[in-house]
Image (cartoon, rainbow, N blue to C red):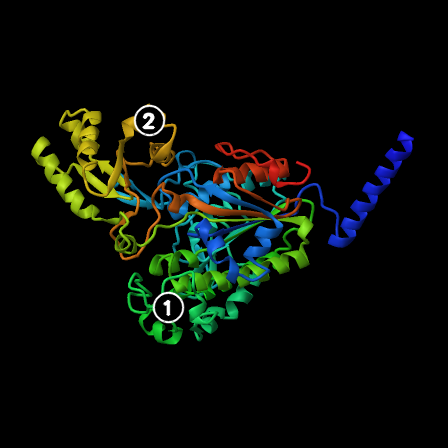
Amino acid sequence: MLKRIFILLFLSNLIINFSYSQFTGSIRPEKPRLVVGIVVEQMRQEYLDRFWDDFGDKGFKKLAINGTYFKNAHLNYSLTQTSPGYATIVTGAEPSGHGIVSDYWYIPLTGEKEKSIESNKSYSVTGIKKQRLSYSPENLFSATYSDEAKLFSKGKSKIISLSLNPLGAILSGGYTADAAYWFDDKSGKWISNTYYMEELPDWVDTINARKSPEKFLERQWKPLMDIEKYTQTLPDTNIYEFGIYGTYKTFPYDYKEIRKYVRDFELINLIPEGNTLTTDFAIAALLNENLGENEYTDFLFINYSVTENIGNLYGPQSVELMDAYLRLDNDLGHLITVLEETVGKNNFILYLTSNCGVSEVPQYLTDNKMPAGYFRQHYIKALLNSYLRVIYGEGNWILDFNNNQIYLNRVLIEDSQIPLRDFQNTVAGFIINSKGIANAITSYNMQNNVFLEGIPLKMQNSYNPKRSGDIMISLSPGWIEDMTNVVAHNSGYTYDTHIPLVWYGWKVRRQTIYDEINITNIAPTISMILNTPKPALSTGISMPQVFIGK
């Protein structure tokens, strides 16, 4: 009797598996043939929920409903800028480990600032001529998960990374990318450089020859819906927006008119068509590079930077930002459809996340009786310099004060026979009393203490002794540096750290998870499902709960 029951159960399982494979079109392979990593810059997690009712059924909603949706994913460091986010996602390490502590850092020996992707070894490749363009991933202290996978496959995996912004394209692609592409807003073309190739592939030249950016800039930007339906935003005429070049703040936006005051193709970075251009190029890369067509897992990194630029100019409560996300939703729907039709849902895995959140407009908060403000760091720097001259005498004691970092003149301090630790404590003690500053921690304390929670832990996770300053500060909640943009992201507070994370495709369970997780978990999770070594500096934890059979 037991034998008969066992046989019936076995046959039932075979029928279920056969039926599933017939329904889906294929049986899931042991590992995905393609990993698609999508980063939407400056996307708060709450955007996914706030705009939910107005999204279509093929983009954000499809991913969240049919995949694993983490509603409580966070960054765990304080300098939540663009570059550290990209590096953290692909290395599984905090900035203290992977070394990309900010978008740029000060070099005391030279007195210059170095960009996160700066290099002196590469030239641009435009298909027409070469010019100096010093970008590469060489400032990363860690390999990425795709680097490890490519080494494991003996170079047979293919890695393509792209973004309008070279930051996303280069940092996502890692050291071993076959190609990283970004948009040149002077020529209106997709380009790369000699770190990756000597000349552009024919398919890229073909796309550039279509002159799509020129065609996009013949359009107008009008709301996708009737303006009164944007109930999740402030009115289009609200006072908290800077707008395009401080002039264009309300719908409609006539691109031809705006271009009279804009150089070359810069406007592409500030309008929804920039996301469409990115999507179209990603699809072209997928098809022309034959990604996901063999047993060796390929990687496609797609990074959307327009959302960051629109958010900076209009803020998180604007009609413009919401409309940009509704249009991006359509672009994602198109991309997902192409992936499913060409690669097959069971053959690729996709994750969508962000590199940072964003603050509210401080004036909007204060008008609603909330604590907030603008930190005048140049004014505070002048006061600090005056204070130090009174105590220690004349001298250029502060080399740089930017990026929530203070770099001291260590040569002068040493020549003056002042203990560095005492000097740092003096500066930190003064600066903590400045309005708008919540924390000030010296590099000595960063290196000699272990912070276990709160903002000090996040500040320590942003600190690297090779690149960070002598004192790191953290502004108070609601405060941002005084700048032309109406918002910023450079804190460890929830509005800057809480970002979406959705998995979709190969063996991904259909579920919503509310447990808090660190975005460093993405890299080791990919390594786990590919059975490849995780990046050496990764501190993240793999998440088998995302997948069926794990």
Q: Secondary structure at mark 2?
A: helix
Instruction: Say which quadrant the C terminus sits in.
Output: top right
Q: Nearer the viewer, residue 200 or 181?
A: 181
Disc 1 marks which residue?
264
Mark 2 or mark 1, earlier in chain = 1
The percent coordinates of residue 394 (x first, y second) are 8, 36
How many residues crowd mark 1 within 10 Å: few (<14), some (14–19), many (20+)? some
- In-image side of 450 versus 548 (left or right): left
The percent coordinates of residue 444 (x first, y second) are 28, 27
Q: What residue is drawn where x is 34% and y is 45%? A: 490
Q: Nearer the viewer, residue 415 or 130?
A: 415
Gap between marks 2 and 1 measured at Cα: 47 Å
Q: Nearer the viewer, residue 383 or 207?
A: 383
Instruction: Identify which amino acid the numbered label 1 is placed on.
Output: Asp
> Residue 419 lies in what quarter of the image?
top left
Q: What residue is drawn where x is 19% and y is 40%? A: 434
Q: Secondary structure at mark 1?
A: loop
- In-image side of 322 versus 342 (left or right): left
Q: Residue 287, relative to residue 1: is it above or below?
A: below
Q: Residue 132, relative to residue 206: is it above or below?
A: above
The percent coordinates of residue 483 (x first, y second) are 26, 54
Instruction: Say which quadrant the N terminus sits in.
Output: top right
Residue 486 appears in the figure: yes
Q: Which mark, residue 447?
A: 2
How many residues crowd mark 2 within 10 Å: few (<14), some (14–19), many (20+)? few
The percent coordinates of residue 270 (x first, y second) are 39, 63
Instruction: Identify which amino acid the numbered label 2 is placed on.
Output: Gln
- In-image side of 522 versus 339 (left or right): left
Q: Residue furthest front?
A: 369
- In-image side of 329 versus 316 (left or right): right
| Front position among marks 2 and 1 | 2
* Number of numbered callouts drawn: 2
